[in-house]
Amino acid sequence: MSRGFVVWLTGLSGAGKSTLADRLQEELAALGRHAEVLDGDEVRTHLSRGLGFSKEDRDTNVRRIGYVARLIARSGGVAITAAISPYRAVRDEIRSQTPGFVEVYVRCPLDELVRRDVKGLYRRALAGEIPNFTGVSDPYEEPPAPEVVVDTAVESVEESVEKVLRTLERLGHVRLGLRQRLPEGEELAALREEAVALPRLRVGSRELSDAYLLAAGALSPLTGFMGSSDYRAVLDHGRLAGGHPFTIPVLLRAGDEAPALRSAERVGLWFGDDPIAVLRLEEVYRTEPDREALAVYGTDDLAHPGVRLLREAGTWALAGEVTALARPASPFPEHDLTPLQVRRLKQERGWRTMVGFQTRNPVHRAHEYLQKVALELVDGLLLHPLVGDTKRDDLPAEVRMRCYRELLDGYYPPQRVLLATNPAWMRYAGPKEAVFHALIRRNYGCTHFIVGRDHAGVGGYYDTYAAHRIFDRYQPDELGIEIFRFEHAFFCRRCDGMASARTCPHPPDQHVNLSGTRVRELLAQGLPLPPEFSRPEVAAVLADAVGVET
């Protein structure tokens, strides 16, 4: 049975609560969730007949609504309340009694409410003709920390409902389809023009990558840079504040210029001379680098590349939804596919299952072996090399992509393999990044993901199979993707082929151990790659890239 929850819409009369409740009910029905709307006016007619508008009667009315909503949620349903519920204490009381309570403050200024007031109730209340009228002659206590704030004076119904749905997804109550914020044409031109007039924050290539991935849906359920509650929950629990698995903070870090942006509603993000995104600013807060280093990387050693970047970054963070105006530059645009484009190609090819493979290293025979073992079990393979920023001694993305093209041309069935770029940057966070990579591939449409030895590791900071064990912390259904945990593969001289400890009986002195690190070492020494390491076509590309004679 699905877990029930309560969406509690609170706000002044005429703010739009009932309209939002009805539209939200429709959207949830489309997602397969049955929802009941408890409208304040209808409840007073059927459940609270005879109650007046004193504080005591109002509180009684709210408690009755809360009780019914709780029963609905307890049975696995969704209750959407649309009642003024003006007093903070009784709302907090309902929250404390109700698991899955999501408070939505429907904000609208009084002058706009008066303008909308077709019945003339606000005018009469302002004239003193209606006593105890909330917002005029009786107080309305705004919620101090609601899960969602919508402003119906400036937002369309669609925008407000989208905010609520995205919050419900982030809290783990629903799972939405991918929704891109990658404008094109006139909309893109208008946003770029707007960005010129907005307060500016200059960013680097990593922020450009993150902004694009957020807007493309690759980091769903995140739609923007993390706020403080999600940030701390990720560090403490490897989950977002609502419980959704997430292991890497995705932050818009800034220096001392950040506090001055607090009053801005929207901020233009600039990379070089170009606006690359618009941020709808929701929060500015301080990060905790010491705690973050240990929580994400498992070390505070400055020799670790991720820790070093963290220490060099600003200690402030800006949070909010992102709309991307540009994507990271790429020399292989034919492979720069969005999550939705990959999903469509998967569907067109008739693949029900698809396994994702991640690497920042040049492809070698062990990679090929793992990929082909997986292809025996699924319909299609997404080769998804990371092409964002990596360490200085890693081979350039262009070289790695050339290697994959050579391999695909001669050694893979083309109808069962899709090559696409992953514009993320490398954190080198070992097991935490293994989960992060799996979630990204889920959003690209993968049903399975390959995790091998020392996934995303660097410099011996992580146990060999720590990236396997971390997945034991999560249930497969909550990750939304199944993990293939592969052991170390090697070339066995006696077997005359690729094998693993599960399939090969021969002693270690017959094994040629393959790794990206060893490939880089041989190339750095000017030595050719033996055929046990790489296919000859791949070896030729690598040799040409580093000037090694074959």
Image (tube, helix red, strand yellow):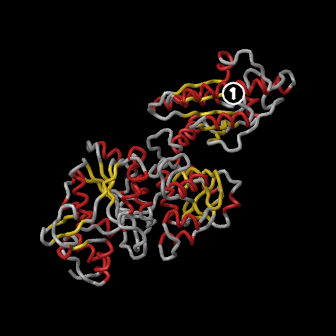
**Is there any visible trace of residue 334 in the rendered image?**
no
Q: Nearer the viewer, residue 189 or 159?
A: 159
Query: Considering depth in this image, is 238 or 527 the residue closer to the camera?
Result: 238
The mark tally for this picture is 1
**On the image, which quarter does residue 459 sit in?**
bottom left
The N terminus: image quadrant: top left
Q: Residue at position x 28%, y 84% from top?
A: 526
- What residue appears at the point 26 percent right and 50 percent down from the top-left corner? 380
- How far across and down, in percent of the image, does residue 213 sit? 46, 55
Q: Nearer the viewer, residue 164 or 1?
A: 1
Residue under the image location 48 percent in, 77 percent down: 303
Q: Against 471, is 525 above or below?
A: below
- The residue shown at (17%, 70%) is 492
Q: Where does residue 9 sit, x and y in percent of width and height?
A: 64, 33
Q: Which residue is mark 1?
A: 62
Q: Residue type at mark 1?
A: Val
- Image location of residue 58, percent across then percent down: 74, 26
Element marked by disc 1 = helix
Q: Residues within 10 Å of mark 1 (few under 14, many from 20)?
A: many
As drawn, is 516 to the left or to the right of 271? left
State the quadrant of the C terminus.
bottom left
Q: Is residue 379 above or below residue 268?
A: above
Q: Is residue 318 above or below residue 142?
A: below
- The residue at the far right in this view is 128
Residue 140 in view of the camera: yes
Which quarter of the picture shows residue 391?
A: bottom left
The picture quadrant where one finds residue 51 is top right
Estimate the x, y position of residue 170 in percent, counting from the top left: 52, 45
Q: Tell me if 149 is positioned left or right of 445 in this view.
A: right
